[in-house]
Image: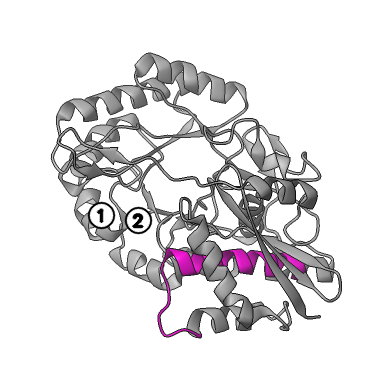
Amino acid sequence: MKITNVELFKVKPRWLFLKIDTDEGISGWGEPIVEGRADTVLACVEEMKSYLLGQDPCKIEDLWQTMYRGGFYRGGPVMTSALSGIDQALWDIKGKYHNMPAYDLMGGACRDKILVYGRAGGSNYDEAVISVKKAMDKGYKAVKTAYEIKYGFLDSFDKIQRMSDMVAGLRAGGGNELIIGIDLHGRVHRTSAKQICYELDKHNLSFIEEPVLSENNDALLEIARYTKTPIATGERIYTRWGFKELFKLGVVDIIQPDVSHAGGIWETRKIAAMAEAYDVVVAPHCPLGPIAFASCLQIDACTPNSVIQEQAIDVHYSENNPALEYLVDKTVFNFKDGYVDIPKKPGLGIEIDEAKVREAAKEGHSWKNPLWRMEDGTVTEW
């Protein structure tokens, strides 16, 4: 079996899909994307085509090593995201070729379903109470929230207090049985991160995500002194070599590699195995489309230290379930009682509606994340 063609499709709301064809009529799909940099990743995949055409798609490790190590310069979000989407498509092909899910080729399933979290939050206590009750009414046993507020290098405690009040509403509305995580989204600098983590500690959160940007992970050593809350990070870290430095810190409890950024399915599985050796758990990052989500579920299925899965079925930029619009079987992701079942079909377990994808790609998108500025005009983190 040989690879005959590689195609890319920009589709709304902000995704890039990849299709790899073979001479035996088996095709695989992947999702290589850096949100807001779709054209850049598209160009990177185009450059990698020469490594793929005419090659055996089942030689995933060799192809990954060729694409990663074949260039003198390597790593970074653009290159590893391009690699990630290609890797996903190759596992999709290999699973279909052997008529089994990708996870069966990686040791087999160790679970039937995985916990997922919904979204909840608000701008104050009362809104948070209402929001979390809605999430629990949908069956969620876990929620993640983010308080969208601009932080400067030095800022007032008022912003911290308002965030704490909102989280208090989540805890009051959800009770102690609810798993609650708060995503600081790398918006906070080390000057405020210690105060925030200390203040949020009283709400008994299950984790605080990205208390600082990944390039400032050395600050986690100090932040960890101010909180008993588990620290989560990793969505902006790429390949096992990036995570190696994180594990050396010894203060991160939950890693969140993104299967469309970190290097793909196989690379993320390797990262998860490294985490297991450090007694660190895995919660794959996935605010993306159906192919990335299906890829995450392949990892969750065969990874014993995977504990919870992010999903983008009902988040703010996925209204009307566009993740499902691109699937032939829109019931393939079975959400029930706060869990999602592991798909059992071959490959990634999903069938892409190619006609829908091709039609959507005619319009494409030019999505960019918001640009935030402080009152004095300086750019700050979104």
Q: Is residue 20 above or below residue 119?
A: below
Q: Report the residue at 42% width, 85% height from top.
A: 72
Q: How is the image coloured?
A: one colour
Quarter that holds the N terminus? bottom right
**Residue 262: % across, % down:** 49, 64
* Residue under label 1: 220
Pointer 1 with pointer 2, Cβ within 8 A? yes
Amino acid, disc 1: Leu
Q: Would residue 133 appear left or right of 236 to someone viewing this image?
A: right
Amino acid, disc 2: Val
Q: Would residue 201 appear left or right of 88 to someone viewing this image?
A: left
Q: Main secondary structure of the magenta part?
A: helix
Q: Report the residue at 25% width, 57% height from top.
A: 216
**Residue 251: % across, % down:** 30, 57
Near-viewer residue (276 or 183): 183
What's the CA distance linking mark 1 and mark 2?
A: 8 Å
Q: Secondary structure at mark 2?
A: loop
Magenta-colored span: 70-94
